[in-house]
Amino acid sequence: MLLRTKLLLPPLPPDLIARPQIVDTLNHALNRTLTLVSAPAGFGKTTGVCQWLQNSSRPAAWVSLDRDDSDFERFLHYLVAALQTIFPSFGAGAFRLFQEDQAPTLDEIATILCNDLLEIPGEFILVLDDYHLIQEQAVHHLLEKMIDYFPAHGHLVLISRADPLLPLTRWRGRGQLIELRAAELRFTTNEIAVYLRQACGLSAVTSKVVSELAHQTEGWITGLRLLAPTLSKNNALPAGYTWSNPHIWSYLVEEVLAFQPPAVQTFLLQTSILEWLCPSLCDAVLHDTAHSTASVNEQAEPSPVESQSRDILEALRRANLFVVVIDEAKNHYRYHPLFQGLLQQQLRASLTEDEIADLHRRAGEWLASADEIEPALSHLLTAGQVDRAVALVEESIQSLLAAEAYAKLDRWIDLLPEERVRRRPALLLARTWQQRYRFRPGAVIMQLKQTAALLDEGGVADPLIERTHRAQIDTLHSEYYYWLGDFDQSAVFAEQALT
């Protein structure tokens, strides 16, 4: 027995706003065979297609698929039943094949269905919603055959959270395929403003709030819908709001995370500490291979484990699992910020502080080896690896000063604990050189006194390093007195610097 409600268009939500660009795109797709609407959960895929069909003059057959529809015969029954809503005699020949002594082949069934599609009078649309739930290869094979020979007066729409296991590249190359993805479905800043003012009744919402919501949700409509009630009566975000919305996280756990295999869940949680992801960085975080030879540009031959990370990242991308491509050539990705927030919460619930710190340590070491110093410092400091972070900055001082990268050096030193900076002559001297290049003689002489006092206290164990530091102090003193016009004193310090 068939559930007839699966053949009905889902009702449009009460907070619907007009999205003419989506309707226009779908209308323009009608001269192709197939439209694939593929995006993560909650991006308005089904709503967008329903909104389009409400304004279309073409009759449409609809199937809302579920996991049980992976069964081939069950899928076939629903497919035929949907098309019978617009052409009652459709599919009779296919079912007669099942009554014969010898079971029909997939190609025979596909041939009969394609012939029946030709008999449908006038233009029509067939929509298969939630196609990502179909796992049976026989269903994919049937659909592939049907799409290859789909009649010109018909159009097929697949709605899916993940790219289906179908030859999309072939159809794309033939010009048969139009795609709507998260980039096209996400709400623009203007649409967010319209949604809040018209659908949510927040008539006085400010452009600042709209911008904050746009930044955090990246146009994800379900995230926007769940965040909107948190706006206060004066149409502003509550003071100290941290975006830790339990409704969003519950939605993501139930609709996204719970369906992932354990290995993928582990990957997602442990790599959620990263601002961006690439295979070898994920490899280092997951498997403590911080000395991987692969660079940030991912040019090295991947190790077997790294290949697994590469495969998982590509699978996450195909599955539209809130993973955003940053640089396709370098295999760089990032997580959607709200999804990353959920993953980090789950990570804190599943690992100890020491275990999480170790993930940050691994990330920091890999990033340092890839010369990504600033993010490396952030991870190392989060891991409590202050000595390693200090050493990393000190190793970079000369190259940064030579490149006149003063702002960068400032940022890196400011990341370090101030009490540690005050105990490191190299860091104090780095600050002094920066003041010298900015022509601030008062600051220079003050920091020189601090550095000299620290050296006098035995702040450096290595005599050669201490001598180098004192030579720099004398050099800067020489310049200081030269600025003052005291050339004799300047010469004294210059001589000391050379001895």
Image (spheres, rainbow, N blue to C red):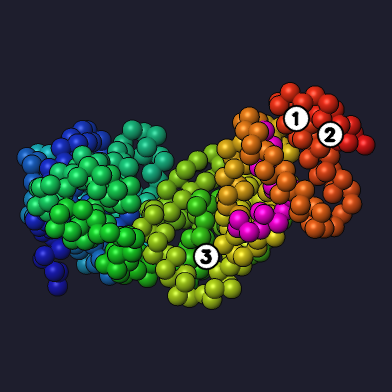
The reply to whether the C-beta atoms of the residues labelled 2 and 1 are less than 8 Å apart is: yes
Of mark 2 and mark 3, the one earlier in the sequence is 3
Circle on res. 270: 3
Three-letter residue code for mark 1: Tyr
Of 104 and 138, nearer the camera is 138
> How many angstroms separate mark 2 from mark 3 (CA)?
54 Å
Residue 395 in the magenta stretch? The answer is no
Q: Amino acid at mark 2?
A: Phe
State the residue position of label 1. Answer: 481
Identify which residue, 490 or 425, lies in the foreground.
490
Left or right? Give the position of 401 relative to 58: right
Question: In the rendered image, which quarter is residue 287 located in?
Answer: bottom right
Res 207 quadrant in image: top left
Residue placed most toward the observer, 382 or 166: 382
Whether residue 103 appears in this view of the structure is no
Provide the secondary structure element on which disc 2 rests: helix
Look at the image and tell me in which quarter the C terminus lies. Answer: top right
Measured from the top left, where is residue 373 in percent x and y? 63, 47
Left or right: where 495 falls relative to 444: right
Residue, x 38% and y 44% (percent of image)? Answer: 168
> Judging from the image, what secondary structure is the residue with disc 1 in?
helix
Q: Is residue 338 left or right of residue 419?
A: left
